[in-house]
Amino acid sequence: MKQDSNQDRTQDGTNDGVIVLRDITKRFGGKVVLDNVSLGIEKGKTTVVIGPSGCGKTVLIKHLIVLLRPNLGQVYYRDQRIDNLSERKLNTIRTHYGFLFQGGALFDSLSVTENIIFPIRQHCEITDWAQVEDLVKAKLAMVGLDGFQNSFPANLSGGQRKRVALARAIALNPEVILYDEPTTGLDPIYSDVISELILKLQRELGVTSVVVTHDMTMAYKVADRIIMLHNGKIIADGDADHIHNHPHPIVQQFIKGQVGEDDLAVLRMSGTASQAQFLPRDFQ
Amino acid sequence: MIGAVGAKTIGGVNNIGRFARFVWQSMIASFRSCLSPCTYPLIWTQMHIIGVRSVPVVMITGAFVGMTLAVQAYDQLAGMGLEEHLGVLINISVVKELGPVLAAVMLAGRIGGALTAELGTMNVTEQIDAVRSMGTDPVRYLAAPRVLACLLLTPFLIIFADLMGIIGGYFVSVVVLGINSRAYWNFSASGVELWDVSIGVVKGFFFGVALAAISCYKGFTCKEGARGVGQACTEAFVASFISILALDFALAVIFKSIYNTFWPLKSLV
């Protein structure tokens, strides 16, 4: 059902979802990074969180898996409150998640195979190593990197590292995959490869995905729903069309990649280029 | 001014609390690791890195401690005609104090810095978060094997340091300075008891746990960036060094009290 393009979907966060954030506030020191955010992540859909750098996107996604705990509010996974669980109990919940970190976060000292079987070794008794090798091969084939089993992260390119990290994230067949800036530092072609992989995983595995990005090309391509964060609050929430036509000036400025009047004013006031170009020899 | 002092005090107390909690978690995780054979390969790996590769540096340290003691003490004792007692002085100093403390300080430099740098880099590159996100306790996976390796191997490394200290002292005293070998060993045997050797080795357990816990904690809590990792390494070494000296003092007092309780007459002699 097509929603009214002038109506944001989630204002109170009470909609059902596989993961629900309710009235989340997160502070670091005196700085409020998330300000009373409520959000429900729908099962089997891809939710994309966009927003300018430093607006709290990564903090938000880390709350979904309780890598960060909120100062106020609650986090629910399948109607179970999880933000107040001990780390030990959370470890069981986290096996239902896969997390692709911004830099991949592959373990440098382990080979590609060892990285991928890491979560399997932690949670399953491995008796048949041939079966595990087949599994690694299948996971790597899924991200287009079969044959790289014995490579080490240091020998891989940025895009390959991201894809190995994605293979690791899906090692335990998670129900939810969280992507933190999956295309940062990649060229447009590799970015598109990652977008295609996200679509492929959703299509073939039916997973619920949450993608944090400021890459609008990717956002439009993979999103069933786009949420925009600004100053720790959700200022827009809807499908791609809704966001594209959103009346909020900050949303329009962000999706069009335009600098704001406030930023321009700061640039005008902060000195001229010629003032900044002197070198010590000018004093001689 | 008062506010700043208050904030620093609260920050300090918070840090101590967090460190105490980390040590407690590490102890529990280490105990569980001992009962779980699937974690043994991780412990063996750390034992190789921490223990086996530290043997040469610890042996060299011990040898120089023994040789330096012999050179320094010879003149004083020879002036009183007591040069044959040099063995007691060297060996008791080596096995009771200098061997354990200097071996532990060398380990703090060699291993402590490496542990902090490794875990700190893992922290800033989100590898520790990655471990958590895959449903694994990073304290159990990363800290416990290192703490166990240090706990189990520091006493053995101290034995190596002691052994080389004794050989170094003997070499300088007997071969270089010409003290009678039989007298050297006779006086050593009469002055150095099994108790003295034992307390030196037992100190190793405490030193090992202290330096591993401090180094892992600093790595886990290291701030972002290369500067953050560097600062964490420096803080880990300084904190480990001070802890080793403080523990040495505390253990010396405790062991002396125990000795006096069980062998009151010996202590008078």
Image (cartoon, helix red, strand yellow):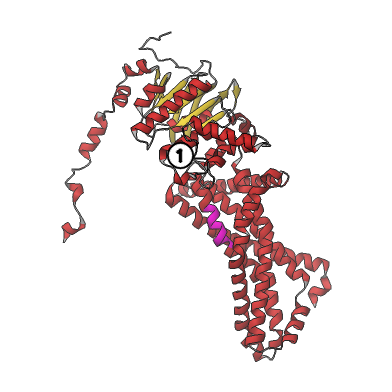
Q: Where is residue B134 in the image (x, y as percent from the top left)?
A: 57, 35
Can residue B143 be seen in the rendering of this structure? yes
* Chain to which the residue tagged by mark 1 belongs: A
- The boundaries of the magenta stretch are B107-116
Residue A272 at x, y percent in the picture: 18, 43
Assign a secondary structure to mark 1: helix
**Up/down of A187 relative to B123, above or below:** above
Q: Does the magenta stretch include residue B112?
A: yes
Quarter of the picture containing the N terminus of chain A is top left
Q: Quadrant of residue B149?
A: bottom right
Which amino acid type is shown beneath numbered disc 1?
Arg
Q: Looking at the image, is B96 positioned above or below residue A35?
A: below
Q: Residue furthest top?
A: A1
Q: Position of residue B236 (x, y in %)?
A: 54, 56
Per the image, the residue denoted by label 1 is: A161
Residue at point 62%, 52% (across, down): B45
The prevailing secondary structure element of the residues shown in magenta is helix
- Place residue A284 in its image quadrant: bottom left
Is A122 placed left or right of B37 in the picture? left
- Count of number-bearing discs: 1
Residue B125 lies within the magenta run: no
Choose between B45 and B192: the one closer to the eye.
B45
B192 horizontally vs A46: left or right: right
